[in-house]
Image (cartoon, rainbow, N blue to C red):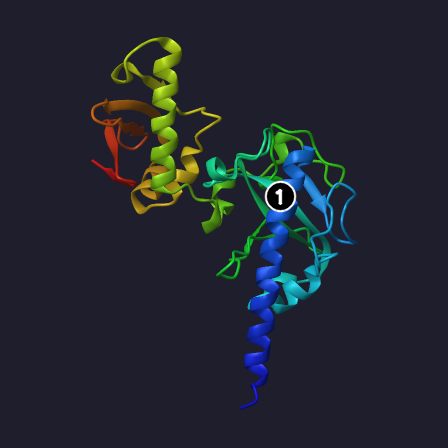
Amino acid sequence: MPLSPDDVAAHRGTNMRKEAHRWLQHVREQCARARQEVADLTHGLPDFVPPLPRSPALDWKGYVASHPQGWDIVGPGVVKFEARFVNSPEPNARQLALPAPYGQFRFDFCVHRADGTCVRLHPSQNRDASPVVGTLASWLLEACASTPSYTPPPSSERPPNMFMELGPVDIVSSESAERMLVDRVRAAAAEAAITPEEVHEDLMNSVWFDWVRFLKARPFGQALLRQGVTSLTLHCSASTPAIAVVLVVTTAKDTDERVIWFRNGKAVLF
């Protein structure tokens, strides 16, 4: 039985997604090892990115066109196509083991559009990328030097409350948060030669734990953000047989301390 046009389109879209996924992995590794924040793929591969075997170039136009939301991604028109590290934590950083300074960050395709907006795409082996629409300024690695393709505006001109622009791919899962917090307790205790239960760390201005993205991922966290978080402290609640951690939080609306407990990859507010 011959395939219908819809079946043919779906098959082509699956192949394009898998190919885009392979290229995303490849370019990410090359950028990390070359210490490059971004790779401009608009007109081909940059010099530091070698072609894949049997795949000399990434057909990004075909990939975008084959995406189920391709029309919306293109929007008013595409002016540039990049792959870049963005200021969202990479949940699989430990397994990827890519070198600093970029290995800890998420790596996405970035579609620049004619109206100044951008769309981030992160195709996986088995699922289409969920488009995240926003602005490049809110995704840049502020601690890193600006790239030739973009000059960031002064901090005073950047949009306030940038976390409101985050899409679902930017969240920090409870499992990832618990792993990071436990690792931090272990490291802090060893560094200060104290017991884990003695570790108390203020996370309000933390550069290693993005608590806004963690809170945004769950209903109780969104409620805390709306109330205005005024303090957030990491504590170790137990160290035998395994380390357990909690976050103590207060808000402008409720000054009484509340506790976020972590256990087996889950977080609960008390």
Residue at x 43%, y 39% (from the top left corner): 213
Q: Secondary structure at mark 1?
A: helix
Q: Is residue 200 in view? A: yes
Q: Where, by quadrant of the figure, is residue 173 drawn?
A: top left
Q: Residue at x 61, y 31 (%)?
A: 142
Q: Which residue is mark 1?
A: 28
Residue 54 versus residue 184 in the image, above or below:
below
Q: Residues within 10 Å of mark 1 (few under 14, many from 20)?
A: many
Q: Position of residue 164 (x, y in %)?
A: 47, 44
Q: As rendered, which of 82 and 153 lies closer to the eye?
A: 82
Q: Residue at x 64, y 53 (%)?
A: 23
The amino acid sitting under disc 1 is: Arg
Image mark count: 1
User: Is residue 230 at least partly visible in the picture?
Assistant: no
Residue 211 appears left or right of 30? left
Residue 72, quarter of the rendered image: bottom right
Horizontal and vertical percent for residue 89? 49, 38
Which quadrant of the rendered structure holds the C terminus? top left
The foreground one among 220 and 168 is 168
- Viewer-proximal residue among 99 and 255: 99
The image quarter in which residue 32 lies? top right
Q: Residue at x 25, y 17 (%)?
A: 197
Residue 252 vs residue 209: left or right?
left
Provide residue 4's location: percent of width, then percent of height: 56, 86
